[in-house]
Image: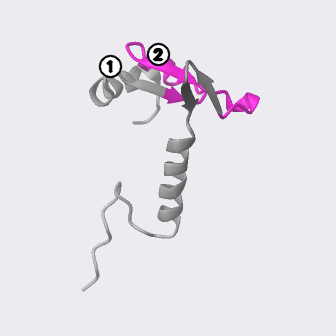
């Protein structure tokens, strides 16, 4: 995908995210148009908001950001993660 836009994300969102899902993102605008049929809440990192409670639900992206940080660290150290195949040993 050369450029990520809401328009080219729509078919991926429709295929991969259940309509009844509650999607939580930061304030990036790229997903706004792609999440039309899903419950969507955002945190505003620019305003230093990282989590808040609404009706007893914690709105946050901390869990997924922690996961991505782990995957990125593993990638930097050359440790295979589930999203990449282990390197083939040289014979």
Q: Tell me if 78 is positioned left or right of 49 in this view.
A: left
The single residue placed furthest to the top in the displayed view is: 36
Q: Which element type, helix, strand or loop, lies under badge 1?
A: loop
Residue at the image position 48 percent from the left and 20 percent from the top: 40
Mark 2 vs mark 1: which is more N-terminal?
1
Label 1: how many residues lie within 10 Å, few (<14), some (14-19) or many (20+)?
some
Nearer the observer, 66 or 90: 66
Check the image and report above or below for 86 versus 12: below
Disc 2 from disc 1: Cα separation: 14 Å
Query: Does the stretch in magenta take in 29?
Result: yes
Q: How is the image coloured?
A: one colour
Residue at the image position 52 percent from the left and 43 percent from the top: 63
Q: Which element type, helix, strand or loop, lies under badge 2?
A: helix
Residue 51, image x and y in percent?
A: 63, 32
Residue at the image position 47 percent from the left and 32 percent from the top: 3
Nearer the observer, 8 or 15: 15
Q: Which mark is residue 19?
A: 1
The single residue placed furthest to the right in the displayed view is: 47
The N terminus sits in image quarter: top left
Check the image and report above or below for 12 versus 69: above
Nearer the observer, 52 or 68: 52
The C terminus sits in image quarter: bottom left
The single residue placed furthest to the front in the displayed view is: 56
Q: Which mark is residue 84?
A: none
Residue 36, image x and y in percent?
A: 42, 13
Residue 39, image x and y in percent?
A: 44, 17
Check the image and report above or below for 85 versus 41: below
Which residues, given as a range, are shown in magenta? 24-50
Residue 4, image x and y in percent?
A: 46, 31
Residue topped by disc 2: 33
The single residue placed furthest to the bottom in the displayed view is: 91
């Amino acid at each position: 995908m050369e450029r990520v836009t809401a328009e080219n994300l729509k078919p991926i969102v429709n295929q991969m995210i259940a309509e009844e899902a509650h999607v939580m993102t930061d304030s990036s605008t790229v997903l706004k148009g792609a999440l039309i049929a899903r419950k969507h809440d955002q945190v505003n990192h620019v305003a230093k908001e990282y989590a808040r409670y609404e009706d007893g639900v914690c709105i946050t992206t901390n869990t997924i950001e922690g996961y991505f940080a782990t995957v990125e660290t593993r990638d930097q150290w050359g440790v295979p993660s589930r999203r990449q195949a282990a390197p083939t040993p040289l014979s």
